[in-house]
Image (cartoon, coloured by chain):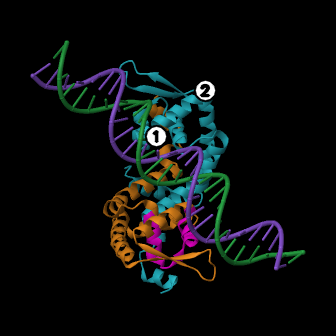
Chain colours: A orange, B cyan, C purple, D green
Amino acid sequence: MTHEESKKNDEFDLQNFLPFLLNQAAEHASLEFQSVYKGRYGMLRTEWRVLFHLGLFGEMTAKEICERARMHKTKISRAVAKLEQRRYLKRTRDEGDRRAEWLTLTPTGQTVYRDLHGVAAAYDAKLSGLFDAEEAALLRKMLQRLAGLD
Amino acid sequence: MTHEESKKNDEFDLQNFLPFLLNQAAEHASLEFQSVYKGRYGMLRTEWRVLFHLGLFGEMTAKEICERARMHKTKISRAVAKLEQRRYLKRTRDEGDRRAEWLTLTPTGQTVYRDLHGVAAAYDAKLSGLFDAEEAALLRKMLQRLAGLD
DNA sequence: GGGTAATAGTTGATTTTGTAACTAACAAGC
DNA sequence: GCTTGTTAGTTACAAAATCAACTATTACCC
């Protein structure tokens, strides 16, 4: 059986398997933007995400970032350490519960955030521009559903 | 400024940033299925993908899998080694070009593939079932576009 | 209040991935 | 047919992700 035949017999092929497709799209969509925060600031994706959360939501604890970003706490812990080391954020112990600490961006961190936020917004617009407005809105809704975010 | 306020002021928020959304959806969608191939056969995602390619397309070289799956050749190389070790596939040198080798599933490999293929198809149907038919078709088309697969 | 369990966050060991350099085989030009 | 360049695939080393165990603190509850 040739490749073409086996493809035809199979109505379920790889190009249509949603987990695979989603992964390909996600990887591809991350690539271009990744080169910006990596290139300009030597940041990892984990670090970018933490920075982005703090920039968007203001003061947060590591635990809150875990939940929102759905990342493991060890990843957060190391990303926070790196961002602190670069003076992008500062930590403040919660005096009410001394296990927790509040994270906020320093002025430097905010500058970096604003820069990257701008790039991100532009890139998002570029991606959205592949579709017309209703399609793009529908896409977001479907992705949120698939991600279990609704 | 409270979290809610800062969210409202920002028309561009994280829940709508496509690379983030895509990533969340992809991770979430992979999770359930991942537990099957991991749990039943102790396979990694890379290995599952190679197995899937060979099952769907028949005989292939590592290079062809690289291109189709968009995975780096070292990942393929290691996944192939693992699958061979478990006797899921066998390699045959191409006598025309002795650098290349053809990979095919063994009967054992085919059995595993058929099992996982069934699970994957069912899971895909479940995910697609979150939307009506046209929406699901549109979603696939949009993801292919985002992935640069069209 | 003392013991047990739970929680926030960190650290260390293991596994997996990514990057570069490598081997072996082929190709092209002269 | 020898040199140079390219390609298929592997291996070695560095970077990063995962998993388990750990510290410090708080909550429960008898």
Locate residue B127: give its quadrant: bottom right
Amino acid type indicated by mark 2: Pro
* Residue occupying image coordinates x 46% and y 40%: B75
Disc 1 secondary structure class: helix
Q: Residues within 10 Å of mark 1 (few under 14, many from 20)?
A: some
* Mark 2 or mark 1, earlier in chain: 1
**Magenta-colored stretch includes residue A64:** yes
Q: Is residue B100 part of the magenta span, yes or no? A: no
Q: Is residue B114 above or below residue A36?
A: above
Q: Which residue is mark 2?
A: B107
Residue designated by label 1: B75
Q: Which residues are the magenta region?
A: A47-73
Among the 4 quarters of the image, the one containing residue A71: bottom right
Q: Horizontally, is A101 left or right of A137 in the view?
A: right
- Name which residue lies at 62% across and 44% down: B38
The residue type indicated by label 1 comes to Lys
Q: Nearer the viewer, residue B148 or A44?
A: A44
Q: Position of residue B9 (x, y in %)?
A: 43, 83
Asked if residue A140 lies left or right of residue A35, the reply is: right
